[in-house]
Amino acid sequence: VRAQVEGGLGERITAAFADAFEDGCDEVIVAGTDVPDLSLDTFTLAFLHLQSFDVVIGPSEDDGYYLIGLHRKMVYDVNKDLVKKLFKGIHWSTSLVYRDQVNIAYKLELSVCPYKCLPVLIDVDTVDDATRWLEKFWNYKARREAEEKKEAQSASSAALALGGASSAASLALVGTKRIFERLKGACNFVPPKNASWKRKGSSQAPGSGEDHDLEPYSMGMLSPTVIFSAIKRLASPPNRHDLRKMDAARERRAVAKTNGKRLSY
């Protein structure tokens, strides 16, 4: 455990990556601690994407990001100053954070994992954020209870559900419920009488702050849709290029153009 350095958010993130790379780490992820739905599955998925991309970003619903990961081969071994440049010029604590971070990465000719490669999660910065997450989790509970009631009507379905339950999912749900109860008391949250769960359409534009078709389960585990989508995308990942110094600029541009995907706003 290391204490954070003094300075702004950009300086602290830069120092965290620099220290980890100096210690010999090849893939490093920095994540916020105010994201109740952030799970081990999300970290695993992020590390998988770092096998193909220089930068992986987990977007938050307020158009910022809750997670960013870097691979040292391009970001540190080629030019150690890239880490410092990557976090300069960002309008922190605004709705421009995600857009600024991606644009800076492309200007530095780094390949960035496409939007929706990681789930869009809620980071709790304000009471409104906490209330929005509480409503989301409450709706999830209502949907889960309705599904369990429906499965209980059939003995075979109930047995299948019990047989497939995992201890990891149960533990994650217990932890999320504990967070829910604490935030509920702190925010004086009153659950809606007629709670219902609806999945938003996938036609929402990136950065719109709405849910999408890759929304994770609130129990802290990714949905099967996310897992199968990740397997499909990673079935034939692009090989990481070992760049020669003399052709570094040209090769970095080609890798970023091939593997990256610019955002459309």
Image: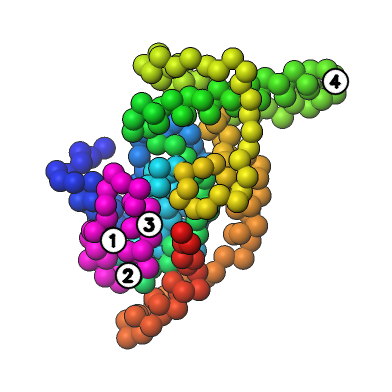
* CA gap, disc 2 and disc 1: 8 Å
Measuring from the top left, give residue 91's x and y in whole percent: 26, 52
Mark 4, secondary structure of its residue: loop
User: Magenta segment, which residues?
Assistant: 77-106
* Residue appearing at x 35%, y 48% in the figure: 95
| Of labels 2 and 3, the one closer to you | 3
* CA gap, disc 2 and disc 4: 57 Å
Mark 3, secondary structure of its residue: helix
Within-10-Å neighbours for mark 2: few <14, some 14–19, many 20+: some
**Which of the two discs, 2 and 1, labels the residue nearer the N terminus?**
1
Residue 259 left/right relative to 201: left
The residue identified by callout 1 is 86
* Residue appearing at x 27%, y 55% in the figure: 90
What is the number of the mark on residue 140? none
What is the number of the mark on residue 99? 3
The residue identified by callout 2 is 108
Residue 213 is covered by the magenta coloring: no
Q: Are marks 4 and 1 in contact (CB under 8 Å)?
A: no
Q: Are marks 2 and 3 in contact (CB under 8 Å)?
A: no
* CA gap, disc 3 and disc 4: 49 Å
Residue flagged by tag 3: what amino acid is it? Arg
